[in-house]
Image: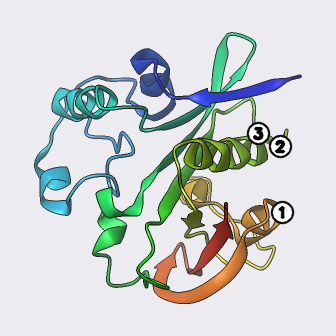
């Protein structure tokens, strides 16, 4: 299996990874951290997918992993200034640098357990670096090896980020699925 990670430019592949099976459902579409909270709460059903299409028209909103022609994974990555992390009170700012954030790593059922999350995180780092980022952050759970519920595993684990060369930069007051989240950072320049 050779996984290729590329910028997310195909709307249908993004839909496969983060969209609902039922188009009228109010699933995340990976918008929760990407757009202001008020707008996120107001968007319903198909309007959520249309917002993703709108964001896609300004550039890829992340990266996708492919096994051949089949999309098998997604990672959201973007400048922090354009996300809710810019004003998040539970995730601190280490400094005033222009930081990129990676906040969602998702692998399709049937493809998990094969290291694709590692490929996605490496792809998110390349994507940010190729767009001029000097530093990238993630906000995974510090689960200390304990099992993380799959519905909450999208933020990644501290160990995943450490294996990708990220260093612990700060503790946060954010908790997800009972685990504290930490701010992990990697210099890119």
Residue 108: name its quadrant: top right
As displayed, is residue 116 above or below residue 169?
above
The total number of labels drawn is 3
Question: Based on the displayed image, in which of its 4 quarters is residue 184 positioned?
Answer: bottom right
In the rendered image, residue 114, in percent from the top left (x then y), is placed at 85, 38
- 164 or 146, which lies in front? 164
Residue 33 visible in this rendered orientation of the protein: yes
**Which element is circle 1 on?**
helix
User: Eyeballing the image, is 118 above or below 24?
Assistant: below
Which label sits on residue 163?
1
Q: Pick the quarter of the image with the N terminus.
A: top right
The residue mark sitting in front, 1 or 2, is 1
Residue 83 visible? The answer is no
Residue 77 horizontal/vertical position (percent): 49, 49
Label 3 residue SS: helix
Question: x%, y% of residue 179?
Answer: 60, 80
As drawn, the label of residue 116 is 3
């Amino acid at each position: 299996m050779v996984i290729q990670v590329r910028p997310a430019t195909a709307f249908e592949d993004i839909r496969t990874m983060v969209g609902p099976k039922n188009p009228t459902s109010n699933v995340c579409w990976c918008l929760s951290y990407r757009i202001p909270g008020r707008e996120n709460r107001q968007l319903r059903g198909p309007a959520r997918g249309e917002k993703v299409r709108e964001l896609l028209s300004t550039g890829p909103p992340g990266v996708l992993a492919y096994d051949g022609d089949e999309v098998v994974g997604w990672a959201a990555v973007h400048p922090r200034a354009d996300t809710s992390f810019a004003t998040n009170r539970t995730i601190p700012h280490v400094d005033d640098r222009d930081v990129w954030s990676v906040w969602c790593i998702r692998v399709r059922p049937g493809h998990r357990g094969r290291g694709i999350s590692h490929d996605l995180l490496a792809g998110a780092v390349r994507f940010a670096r190729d767009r001029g980022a000097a530093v990238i952050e993630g906000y995974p759970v510090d689960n200390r090896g304990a099992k993380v519920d799959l519905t909450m595993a999208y933020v990644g684990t501290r160990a995943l980020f450490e294996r990708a060369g990220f260093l612990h930069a700060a503790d946060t007051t954010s908790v997800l699925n009972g685990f504290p989240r930490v701010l992990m950072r990697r210099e890119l320049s």
